[in-house]
């Protein structure tokens, strides 16, 4: 019995490390991943309120960083109740089959003044395409602020299929803007 | 103008019964453009009516004259208030009207999704009130034409005059 409990404790102590790898966590309250799209020419603001990041970063060597970000597609707030109700459906994110959209970095090119081009792969709705995201990294006390904006074409990822492929009602281009506050994790104890 | 009003009323009802689709978005945009055009026309008409006295009413019992002037006032108020309330709905919903896909009209309110639904109900209720008044108005006009045989209806529809 004692052995069992000990065993459980070991597993339990491993769980947080497994769930969120990397040496930084995101302060959700002070971070945001938003997006902007156009319906009948009117600009609407949406948000991805739920995401999980796995960030391995040494502020002294930012170009060596590894960033993986998973967005929970079902939680998407499309900025309008009718649109929010629709956005998880098979024609859009198909959240039941593809619960997350992922960006995974592969190479980071420094561009001076705290700017970087993060190259990697963006996977949405089962479609993976290369993506380059210009970002800025700023030190805020002990924390790091990672901001950036990029544009993508929703139809590249089949976001809006069938009747919604009609770009005269719903524009193809979507602008994504994010600002993430990275908070250092308490340093991992080496066993 | 009356025809455009009826058409836009019908369009509004059809749009509100549709599920979200690109066609709905387009029809809703047309509904808003037509509604804003009607708002401009009603405003011009109100100004016109305030500047130029309408022709004196047909002889009728006093209660009828009173009812008629209330009816006219109410019709004008609604023809004005309905598009304004629609404009308030889209403002609260945070969806600006892009008139004819060319000009973005100002928002009357800052975006506030909690107000969008109640305002939509106001838009709907005003429309129902308009529907009632129009029915009464039309019945009254027909009564004047058929029973009293006066020229009330002909004055409303100048096109009939030519046929007399
Ligand atoms: C004289 C002009 C107008 C008339 C007669 C009119 C009439 C209507 C009617 C009958 C409905 C359906 C109500 C229901 O049963 O739920 C409706 C819905 C609506 N109208 Fe109007 N309207 C006018 C102008 C406008 C304007 C100017 C706007 C916006 C700028 C507007 C925005 C809307 C919206 C957003 C809806 C709700 C559609 C939905 O359910 O998704 N309307 N209108």
Image (tube, rainbow, N blue to C red):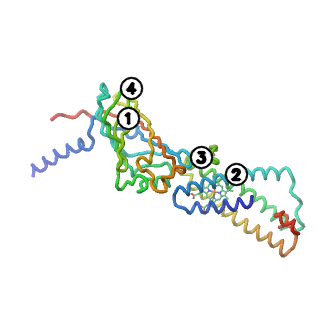
Q: Please tell me whether mark 3 or mark 2 is closer to you in this view.
A: 2
Ligand 1, by image quadrant, is bottom right
Q: Give SS at disc 3.
A: loop
Q: Characterize the local packing of mark 4: few (<14), some (14-19) or many (20 or more) Cα atoms within 10 angstroms.
A: few
Query: Residue drawn at (58%, 49%), measured in percent from left and top?
Result: B92
For the C terminus of chain A, which image quadrant?
top left
Q: Characterize the local packing of mark 3: few (<14), some (14-19) or many (20 or more) Cα atoms within 10 angstroms.
A: many
To which residue does mark 2 refer?
A: B37
Q: Give SS at disc 4.
A: strand
Q: Where in the figure is residue B151, as x and y percent of width and height?
A: 87, 68
Q: Quadrant of residue A128?
A: top left
To which residue does mark 1 refer?
A: A181
Q: Where in the figure is residue A125, as x and y percent of width and height?
A: 37, 50
Q: CA distance from mark 1 to mark 4?
A: 21 Å
Residue A111 is tagged as 4
To which residue does mark 3 refer?
A: B96
């Amino acid at each position: 019995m004692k052995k069992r409990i000990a065993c459980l404790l070991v597993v339990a102590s491993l769980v947080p490390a497994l769930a969120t790898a990397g040496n930084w966590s995101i302060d959700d309250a002070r971070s945001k991943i938003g997006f902007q799209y156009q319906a009948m020419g009117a600009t609407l603001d949406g948000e991805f309120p739920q995401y999980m990041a796995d960030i391995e970063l040494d502020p002294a060597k930012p170009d060596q960083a590894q960033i993986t970000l998973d967005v929970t597609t079902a939680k998407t707030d499309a900025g309008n109740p009718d649109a929010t109700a629709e956005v998880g459906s098979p024609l859009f994110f198909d959240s039941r089959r593809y619960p997350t959209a992922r960006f995974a970095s592969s190479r980071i090119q420094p561009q001076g003044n705290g700017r970087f081009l993060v190259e990697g792969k963006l996977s949405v709705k089962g479609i993976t395409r290369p993506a380059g995201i210009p970002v800025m990294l700023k030190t805020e006390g002990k924390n790091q602020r990672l901001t950036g904006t990029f544009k993508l074409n929703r139809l590249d990822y089949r976001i809006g299929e069938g009747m919604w492929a009609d770009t005269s009602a719903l524009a193809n281009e979507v602008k994504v803007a994010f600002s993430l506050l990275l908070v250092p994790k308490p340093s991992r104890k080496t066993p | 103008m009356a025809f455009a009003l009826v058409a836009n009323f019908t369009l509004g009802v059809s749009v509100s019964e549709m599920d979200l689709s690109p066609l709905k978005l387009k029809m809703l945009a047309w509904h808003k453009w037509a509604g804003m055009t009607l708002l401009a026309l009603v405003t011009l008409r109100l100004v016109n009516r305030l500047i130029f006295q309408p022709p004196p009413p047909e002889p009728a019992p006093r209660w009828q004259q009173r009812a008629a002037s209330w009816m006219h006032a109410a019709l004008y108020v609604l023809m004005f208030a309905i598009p304004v309330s629609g404009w308030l709905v889209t403002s609260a919903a945070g969806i600006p009207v892009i008139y004819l896909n060319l000009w973005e009209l100002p928002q009357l309110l800052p975006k506030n999704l909690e107000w969008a639904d109640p305002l939509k109900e106001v838009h709907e209720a005003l429309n129902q009130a308009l529907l009632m008044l129009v029915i009464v108005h039309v019945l009254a006009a027909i009564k004047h034409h058929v029973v009293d045989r006066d020229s009330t209806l002909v004055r409303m529809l100048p096109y009939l005059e030519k046929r007399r």
